[in-house]
Amino acid sequence: MKLPAVATLHEAAALAATLPAAVAAGSGVLHIDAHELKAVDSSTLALLLQARRLAQAAGRTVVVDGAPPKLQQLARLYGLEALVPFSGPASSPASASSSGRPDTA
């Protein structure tokens, strides 16, 4: 499954509607490609948590590949980093702010 550049509140319902088919389309790990993702909010996290719930119900796991630092920062802010597994270059420790807090600029 590939996320678009914008996955915020306005897009969440349409994206959520694609989740059941994405989960049913395979087995094993469901990779969610977030490399192009630029605009995120708490709805993006809700979408990823819904993907995780659906995947678990189907005996699958989820990995988010290439998540932007802002999405990872939101996950940490809400205490969800253990529930939303990130992988890929954007999830390296160097990509996060050195203070561990979300950048405000």
Image (cartoon, rainbow, N blue to C red):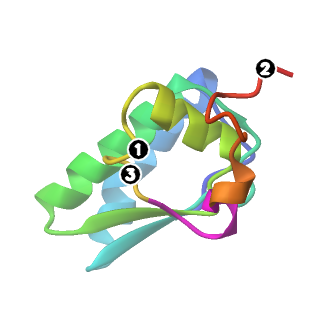
For the record, the magenta segment spans: 86-92
Discs 3/2, front: 2
User: Can you tell which quarter of the image residue 93 is in?
Assistant: bottom right
Residue at left offset 61%, top offset 23%: 10
Residue at left offset 51%, top offset 24%: 42
Q: Is residue 49 left or right of residue 10?
A: left
Who comes first in sequence, dot 2 or dot 1? 1
Who comes first in sequence, dot 3 or dot 2? 3
Residue at left offset 40%, top offset 32%: 46
Q: Which residue is mark 1?
A: 81
Give the numbered dot on residue 12: none
The reply to whether residue 44 is visible in this rendering is no
If the image is split into quadrants, where does the C terminus sit? top right
* Residue 84 point in image, percent of width and height: 39, 49
Q: Which residue is mark 3?
A: 19
User: Can you tell which quarter of the image residue 92 is in?
Assistant: bottom right
Q: Amino acid at mark 1?
A: Glu
